[in-house]
Image (cartoon, rainbow, N blue to C red):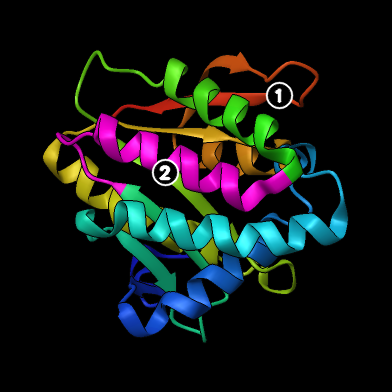
């Protein structure tokens, strides 16, 4: 699929897209191994995920780098641009507290996961950070994930900026590898599934 065709599949998300973005991400990550570990009970996870993604949208709103698909929001991606901290220390502490409240009995697992990502986040050079990208299962394999990546990666290539993310499944890792990301490390919460730190140099 050409870059032009991909660009027609995604757009910057607006306030009216908030509900669709939250719903799409919650559905996309319901079967994700990391989120299933964080909230093992199916019913509780399905209550927690919309709250988590709503908090994530709010935490990254100032960056104005949330993108969604053009087809009724079947997927979305939340980015932080190069040269800024994804969250300030104060905002990060508040985010963790609110996530713990939303997670209820699973709070310790969520806090451990948040700390794991924070402790392993690279700080050696400015980079675009893909925090979350998900597509509803029924719409996967149609180019939407690639479109949501290219919206920022094309700009990263033009400006010579690297990009970073954490892949939460082998399927996600393969998608990111097709777009130039390479695994730089593996991490896991105690007793949890692996996540892969992935870095991409501009191309």
The answer to whether 123 is drawn above or below residue 90 in the figure is: above
Looking at the image, can residue 67 be seen?
yes
Left/right placement of residue 116 relative to residue 153 reads: right
Residue 39: image quadrant is: top right
Q: For the C terminus, which image quadrant?
A: top left
Q: Closer to the camera, 73 or 106?
A: 106
User: What residue is pinned by disc 2?
Assistant: 95
Left/right placement of residue 98 relative to residue 201 reads: right
Q: For the point 55% across and 55% down, which residue is it? A: 52
Q: Earlier in the sequence, mark 2 or mark 1?
A: 2
Q: Residue 82: say if magenta.
A: yes
| Residue 118 location (% of width, % of height) | 43, 24
| Residue 36 location (% of width, % of height) | 79, 44
User: What residue is pinned by disc 1?
Assistant: 194
What is the secondary structure assignment of the residue under circle 2?
Answer: helix
The answer to whether 203 is drawn above or below residue 72 in the figure is: above
Q: Residue 100: say if magenta.
A: yes
Q: For the point 30% across and 77% down, which residue is it? A: 14
Which stretch appears magenta?
80-104
Q: Closer to the camera, 86 or 76?
A: 86
| Residue 188 location (% of width, % of height) | 67, 19
Q: Give neighbour class at mark 2: few <14, some 14-19, many 20+ (Cα, 10 Å).
A: some
Q: CA distance from mark 2 to mark 1?
A: 23 Å
The answer to whether 77 is drawn above or below residue 177 in the figure is: below
Q: Closer to the camera, 98 or 66?
A: 98
| Residue 51 location (% of width, % of height) | 57, 61
What is the secondary structure assignment of the residue under circle 1?
Answer: loop
Q: Are marks 2 and 1 in contact (CB under 8 Å)?
A: no
């Amino acid at each position: 699929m050409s870059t032009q065709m991909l660009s027609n599949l995604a757009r910057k998300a607006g306030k009216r897209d908030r509900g669709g973005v939250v719903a799409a991400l919650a559905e996309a990550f319901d079967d994700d191994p990391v989120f299933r570990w964080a909230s093992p009970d199916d019913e509780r996870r399905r209550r927690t995920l919309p709250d988590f993604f709503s908090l994530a949208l709010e935490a990254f709103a100032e960056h104005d780098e949330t993108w969604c698909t053009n087809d009724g929001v079947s997927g979305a991606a939340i980015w932080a641009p190069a040269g800024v901290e994804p969250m300030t220390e104060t905002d990060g502490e508040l985010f963790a507290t609110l996530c713990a409240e939303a997670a209820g009995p699973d709070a310790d697992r969520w806090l451990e996961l948040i700390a794991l990502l924070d402790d392993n986040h690279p700080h050696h050079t400015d980079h675009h950070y893909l925090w979350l990208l998900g597509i509803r299962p029924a719409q996967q394999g149609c180019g939407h994930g690639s479109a949501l990546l290219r919206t920022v990666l094309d700009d990263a290539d033009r400006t010579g900026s690297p990009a970073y993310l954490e892949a939460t499944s082998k399927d996600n890792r393969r998608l990111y590898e097709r777009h130039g990301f390479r695994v730089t490390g593996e991490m896991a919460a105690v007793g949890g599934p692996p996540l892969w730190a992935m870095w991409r140099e501009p191309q």
